[in-house]
Image (cartoon, rainbow, N blue to C red):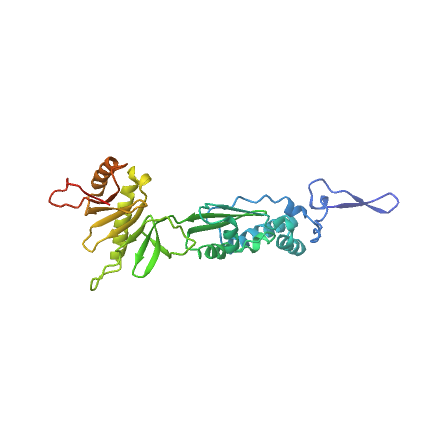
């Protein structure tokens, strides 16, 4: 405490308190909220955004940390808290200046930013990351989306896009399916046109289950995967996989449409036989029209029909 004592002339004078006492420090004056960079915020070093903290609530928590820092440094002054909050909400320091988008394959950065409505200059605390993720996932080509804030001025978007494996005819509709057999959208003119088509997916059977179509799509994709491992795939790209009601497969390849009647498998073995046959018949000997590898009684036999 400050001590007082009288002079010889009867007047009183102030004796400075020892260093470290409460009186030794000048009272904290609240920073002007209109100043460009208040000291209590300019010294704030944000923690890196943690994986999964992507909601609007997280933004409010982060803003709360800034306000709490103002409370600790300002001794609980209401003016400091109000100034800190106002600064965080309005200062150009927390305006979005950079938007990073990773995982792009088919989509463009501009398309993703437009879907998420992540406009540069927007206050980073007002970015609703959950709403941005939902908006991005409206695009059927995008399987996963994560939006994160990186203080003070960066928003990061991480995508996982679907990879198309084929087209599938289901009734009157042509759908795009992934390599895992997931139909995820109707085919449009802007979608890849060089994908093989799986036909014969729908089978008219009384009381059949919808899961049957998934299994038949998976069968068509399995045949395509085996075919892609052969040298024929580069010379004769797959065009169509037709599934018969009895479970047999006809694979049409090449621009001229060579029909490989594979029967019911085994796919790898029969495709290897087709590879040897087509390798011998290439050139001036004529154009191959059909290759029959579906003889159940004699699976080692191959019949070729020329055009």
Snapshot quadrant of residue 103: top left
> Going by the image, does 88 lie left or right of 216?
right
- Residue 69 in the image: x percent, y percent? 60, 49
Relative to the observer, which residue lies in front, 167 or 7? 167
Q: Is residue 129 left or right of residue 3?
A: left
Task: Locate residue 300, reporting x and y percent.
Answer: 15, 39
Measured along the vertical axis of the image, is residue 130 above or below residue 260? below
Q: Quadrant of the C terminus?
A: top left
> In this rendering, would 277 be left or right of 99?
left
Say which residue appears at 20% left-offset and 56% top-offset. Answer: 245
In the rendered view, tell whether residue 300 sits above or below residue 169: above
Looking at the picture, how far across and down is residue 242, in whole percent? 25, 52
Position of residue 209 measured from the top left corner of the image (x, y, whole percent): 24, 60
Q: Which residue lies at the image location 67% right of the left edge and 46% below the top edge?
A: 39
Q: Residue furthest right?
A: 9
Question: In this view of the protein, which residue sits in the foreground, 141 or 293?
Answer: 293
């Amino acid at each position: 405490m400050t001590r007082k004592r009288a002079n010889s002339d009867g007047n009183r004078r102030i004796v400075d308190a020892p260093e470290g006492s409460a009186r030794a420090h000048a009272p904290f004056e609240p920073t002007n909220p209109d100043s460009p960079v208040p000291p209590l915020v300019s010294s704030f070093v944000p923690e890196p955004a943690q994986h999964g903290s992507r909601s609007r609530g997280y933004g409010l928590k982060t803003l709360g940390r800034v306000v709490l820092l103002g409370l600790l440094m300002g001794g609980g002054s209401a003016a400091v808290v109000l100034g800190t909050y106002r600064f965080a909400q309005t200062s150009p320091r927390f305006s979005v200046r950079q938007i990073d988008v990773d995982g792009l394959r088919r989509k463009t950065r501009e398309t993703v930013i437009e879907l998420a409505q992540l406009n540069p200059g927007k206050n980073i605390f007002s970015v609703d990351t959950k709403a941005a993720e939902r908006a991005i996932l409206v695009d059927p080509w995008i399987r996963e989306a994560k939006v994160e804030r990186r203080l003070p001025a960066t928003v990061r978007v991480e995508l996982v896009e679907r990879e198309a494996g084929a087209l599938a005819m289901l009734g009157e509709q042509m759908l795009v399916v992934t390599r895992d057999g997931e139909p995820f959208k109707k085919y449009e003119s802007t979608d890849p046109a060089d994908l093989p088509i799986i036909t014969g997916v729908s089978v008219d059977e009384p009381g059949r289950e919808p899961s049957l179509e998934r299994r038949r799509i998976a069968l068509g994709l399995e045949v395509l995967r085996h075919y892609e491992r052969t040298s024929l795939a580069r010379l004769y790209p797959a065009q169509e996989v037709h599934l018969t009601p009895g479970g047999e497969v006809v694979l049409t390849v090449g621009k001229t449409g060579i029909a490989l009647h594979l029967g019911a498998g085994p796919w790898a073995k029969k495709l290897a036989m087709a590879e040897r046959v087509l390798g011998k018949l290439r050139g001036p000997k004529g154009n191959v029209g059909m290759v029959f590898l579906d003889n159940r009684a004699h699976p080692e036999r191959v019949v070729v029909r020329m055009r």
